[in-house]
Structures are given as C-alpha cells and as structure tokens.
Image (cartoon, helix red, strand yellow):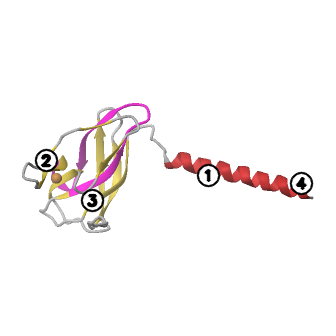
Amino acid sequence: MISKIYKVASYLLILFLLISCTKEVKKNHIPKNTSTSNEWIRAAAAGMNTALFFELKGSRFYKDTLKSVEADVAEIIQIHETVKDKSGRMVMQEIGPVPVKRGQLVNFKPMGKHIMFIVLKNDLLPGDSVEVKFNFAKSKSIIRKVVVKNFEKPREK
Ligand SMILES: [Cu+2]
C-alpha cells in the first residue's frame, strides 16, 4: 500500500517536473524567423505625430535587419532613436534600418528606439487597432494588429 503511494507520488513529481520544464523552454522561446512582440502605439490626434513600440526578436537561425515599417495611418513612417545631445537635451534622430543578431532582443520603447508615425491621417484612440507591416532584409514581412494605448509613464523608483 505504502509503496503504491510512493509510486503515485513519484509519477506526480515527474509529471510536475516535465510541465515546469516545458514552461521554462516556452518562456525563453527564440523564434525561427525574425519576429516582434508586445507592440503598441501611443494614442494621438489626427495631424499629430506618435510612435510605435515593440520588442524585436532575432531568429535563432540567422541575423537580420528591420528595414522599414508600413502602416496606412501616417503620412511618413521612420525608424527613430531618442538620444542625449551635447547639451544634455533628449532629441530624436532617424537611425534607418536596425540590425538584429541571432536570438537577440532589441527593445523599441519610450525614450529609446521607436517607429515614428509623422502626421497621423486620423485620430488614434485608446482601444483602436492598426495594421502594421514589418519589413526585414531576410525574413518574410510580418503583419500585426497593433493596439493603441495611452502612454503610461514608467514607475519611478
Ligand atoms: Cu521619433
């Protein structure tokens, strides 16, 4: 009887270990092809500028370059980075295509790299979604439905 309980217990333990291992693998999953995740666009009114943020994930098999981003909601779309100029002011500059190494994660986030949407054709309100196409040098282009959100200030420590 006791040995039976041990047997069941050890089966459960193995099962538990298997499940937790699978979770671990998924969490660190590196995509086959160049990919993006956690995309969002900051809400803004027609005629204004805004930005798209996301995580760029390098393929586990090859290095790649994010060449351009397309969306039908802005007159001009550029790849930008916010940097400090000589006088210590934060300024944005166009950086052009962004390389991504195998398995690398490149963050496009407020006060860093971002996709600039210049002169919006319509209002972008929180909850709206925008079809965005990411074009790469090597990987096939990908299309994402990107949600529009209000800007949330990162919590200060
Ligand atoms: Cu910008």
Name the residue carrying label 1. 20
Q: Nearer the viewer, mark 3 or mark 2?
A: 2
Q: Is residue 63 above or below residue 2?
A: above
x, y percent for residue 28: 49, 46
Sequence-wise, the earlier of marks 3 and 2 is 3
Cα–Cα span, label 2 and label 1: 44 Å
Residue density around tag 4, few if under 14, some if 14–19, many if 20 or more, within 10 Å: few
x, y percent for residue 62: 39, 31
**Considering the numbered disc 2 on the image, is that residue within a helix, a strand or a loop?**
strand
**Considering the numbered disc 1 on the image, is that residue within a helix, a strand or a loop?**
helix
Tell me which secondary structure the magenta stretch mostly adopts.
strand
Sequence-wise, the earlier of marks 2 and 4 is 4
Q: What range of the chain is rendered magenta?
A: 51-77
Q: Quadrant of residue 139?
A: top left
Cα–Cα span, label 4 and label 3: 59 Å
Q: Which mark is residue 97?
A: none
Magenta region includes residue 57: yes
Q: Which mark is residue 41?
A: 3
Label 1 lies in ligand 1 vicinity (Cβ under 8 Å): no
Residue beneath the point at 43% across and 31% down: 61
Residue type highlighted by circle 4: Ser
